[in-house]
Amino acid sequence: MKQVNLLILIILASSFLFPSIGYCSVESSLSAVQSKLITTILPLASILGLVCAGISFASGSQNARNHLVLAIIGAIVGFGAPSIVQFIQGLIH
């Protein structure tokens, strides 16, 4: 069993150290992760934050105003993330 685990570890380590073995590049993998984060996860998290803040506000919580302000800031960052990333990439290139 230990030999099988060692073999799996060697295969995984070699695929991370030498991405051409796995027929992929690290840059394209990171670009795919960045794209998924920016286009899917951040807007979803922003909407969930706004919903939670709205529920907190409707339930009469004392911290509802702070929750709402932070949710709005999060929504601005979440929905503005593609523009922010393009701006930073423009500064670098």
Image (spheres, rainbow, N blue to C red):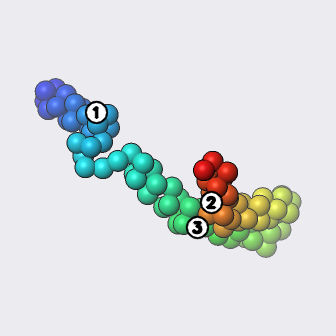
Counting other residues with Cα less than 10 Å from the Cα at mark 1, is it few (<14), some (14-19), or many (20 or more)?
A: few
The amino acid type of the residue labelled 3 equals Leu
Residue with the most extreme front position? 93
Q: In this figure, which residue is indicated by the disc labeled 3?
A: 44
On the image, the x and y values in percent for residue 34 come to 51, 55
> Does dot 1 land on a helix, a strand or a loop?
helix
Q: Amino acid at mark 1?
A: Ala
Which of the pair 61/73 is nearer the observer? 73
- Tag 3's secondary structure? helix
Assess disc 3: are there few (<14), some (14-19) or many (≥20) residues with their C-alpha within 10 Å of its C-alpha: some
Q: Nearer the viewer, mark 3 or mark 2?
A: 2
Q: Which mark is residue 1?
A: none
**Residue 32 in sight in this render:** yes
Q: Which residue is mark 2?
A: 86
Left or right relative to 87: residue 26: left
At horizontal 30% and vertical 42% (from top left) the residue drawn is 19
Picture quadrant of residue 80: bottom right
Residue where numbered disc 1 is placed: 13
Could you tell me how far apart the alpha carbons at marks 1 and 3 are, in whole angstroms?
A: 33 Å
Q: Of tags 1 and 3, which is closer to the observer?
A: 1
In the image: residue 48, left or right of residue 18: right
